[in-house]
Image (spheres, rainbow, N blue to C red):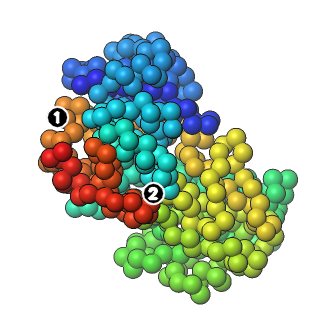
């Protein structure tokens, strides 16, 4: 198979779909890898590094899309990239379609086979193995950026996250105790913050309580506990996820009036539409805005801030799946792995992921039926 890797074009996105070590794996199995020139320069992988690994360097993204059987990216295809996709071509990347009807329609119109990293499930349908590395990074970053923006000159209320002897630390509220919420809590407790995690799954609450052993307050999430915790928080991390679907709006506009002036909210769920009613996607070029004296950080590609770490972590997780697609073709691979099949979001002009279709008020077909298209 011929695998194509275009340079990412989203604002300040430096990650790359394949690093040289991954290219070498494809080439060793007899596949051809096409890399757009300078695709990896943002994380110090030169064209020469890719050529040494066995890749062919291609001058333009247009040529990559024209020649490749499978396109591998990091971020969702932008409008001009959707137009370069063609019928039957495999797209393997993050998509986050539930919050992006225009992209969804572009993929439908192209007739491509779009497989989303974020909806591939783990054994027995549990976990999201290709989303987890970015969730881990986003969770850890959320505390870094949150503590930075708590500084007064950045618009925050001026509280040091870990406090000092005689002065209390910041109150950090984390909505959701999944992968990103867990890693946010690790960072926040490590910095000495007063951490509260709101969660609804009883097994997950037991795990969190045993792990943090009193270093974080694990509280059942309902409207009452949410409203009380929001009013007390200096920093709020939104870390809720419904696989494939839009994130629930847990914090309403009205709740902002109960919060401390200069408090900071970081919405990790912004890729799926955000879990604050006042969230709107921002970029690393202009990451924050203020609503009712509350500073919002809603960057849609948070892990792009640390692209070297992110690209390497992502490749480690994605590579085994991508090799199976290349070795066996998408139909055979997905037919034999129902968890991988859950990653199929669009195929032959149809949405094949029901939560995505429901979020966009569009029709869908079962992913299984797409295997016979």
Q: Residue at x 16, y 34 (%)?
A: 328
Q: Residue at x 55, y 32 (%)?
A: 9
Q: Residue at x 24, y 25 (%)?
A: 1
Q: Residue at x 47, y 46 (%)?
A: 103
Q: Quadrant of residue 332?
A: top left
Q: Which residue is mark 1?
A: 328
Q: Is residue 144 left or right of residue 33?
A: right
The secondary structure type at the circle numbered 1 is helix
The secondary structure type at the circle numbered 2 is helix
Which disc number belongs to residue 180? none
Q: Given contact means CB atoms under 8 Å apart, are the residues at marks 1 and 2 in contact?
A: no
Which disc number belongs to residue 98? 2
Q: In this orientation, which residue lies closer to the viewer: 150 or 215?
A: 150
| Viewport quadrant of the C terminus | top left
Work out whether 129 lies above or below 75.
below
Q: Which mark sits nearer the N-terminus, 1 or 2?
A: 2
């Amino acid at each position: 198979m011929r695998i194509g890797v275009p340079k990412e074009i989203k604002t300040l996105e430096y990650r790359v779909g394949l690093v040289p070590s991954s290219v070498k794996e494809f080439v060793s199995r007899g596949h051809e890898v096409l890399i757009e020139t300078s695709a990896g320069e943002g994380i110090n992988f030169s064209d020469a590094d890719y050529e040494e690994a066995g890749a062919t360097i291609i001058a333009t993204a247009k040529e990559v899309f024209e020649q490749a059987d499978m396109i591998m990216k990091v971020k969702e295809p932008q409008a001009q990239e959707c137009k370069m996709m063609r019928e039957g071509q495999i797209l393997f990347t993050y998509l986050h379609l539930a919050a992006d009807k225009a992209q969804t329609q572009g993929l439908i119109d192209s007739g491509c086979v779009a497989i989303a990293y974020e909806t591939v499930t783990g054994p027995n349908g549990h976990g999201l193995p290709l989303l987890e590395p970015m969730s881990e990074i986003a969770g850890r970053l959320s505390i870094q950026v949150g503590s930075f923006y708590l500084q007064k000159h950045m618009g925050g209320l001026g509280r040091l996250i870990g406090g000092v002897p005689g002065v209390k630390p910041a109150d950090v509220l984390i909505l959701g105790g999944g992968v990103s919420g867990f890693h946010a809590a690790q960072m926040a407790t490590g910095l000495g913050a007063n951490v509260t995690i709101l969660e609804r799954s009883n097994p997950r609450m037991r795990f969190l309580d045993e792990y943090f052993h009193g270093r974080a307050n694990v509280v059942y999430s309902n409207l009452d506990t949410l409203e009380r915790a929001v009013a007390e928080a200096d920093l709020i991390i939104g870390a809720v996820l419904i696989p494939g679907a839009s994130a629930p709006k847990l914090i309403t506009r009205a709740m902002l009036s109960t919060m401390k002036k200069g408090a900071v909210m970081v919405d990790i769920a912004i890729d799926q539409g955000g879990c604050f009613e006042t969230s709107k996607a921002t970029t690393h070029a202009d990451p924050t805005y203020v609503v009712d004296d509350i500073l919002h950080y809603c960057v849609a590609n948070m892990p792009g801030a640390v692209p070297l770490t992110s690209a390497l972590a992502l490749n480690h997780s994605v590579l085994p799946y991508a090799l199976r697609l290349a070795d066996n073709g998408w139909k055979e691979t997905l037919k034999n792995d129902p968890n991988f099949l859950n990653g199929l979001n669009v195929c032959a002009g149809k949405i094949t992921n029901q939560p995505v279709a429901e979020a966009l008020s569009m029709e869908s077909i079962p992913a299984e039926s797409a295997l016979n298209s």
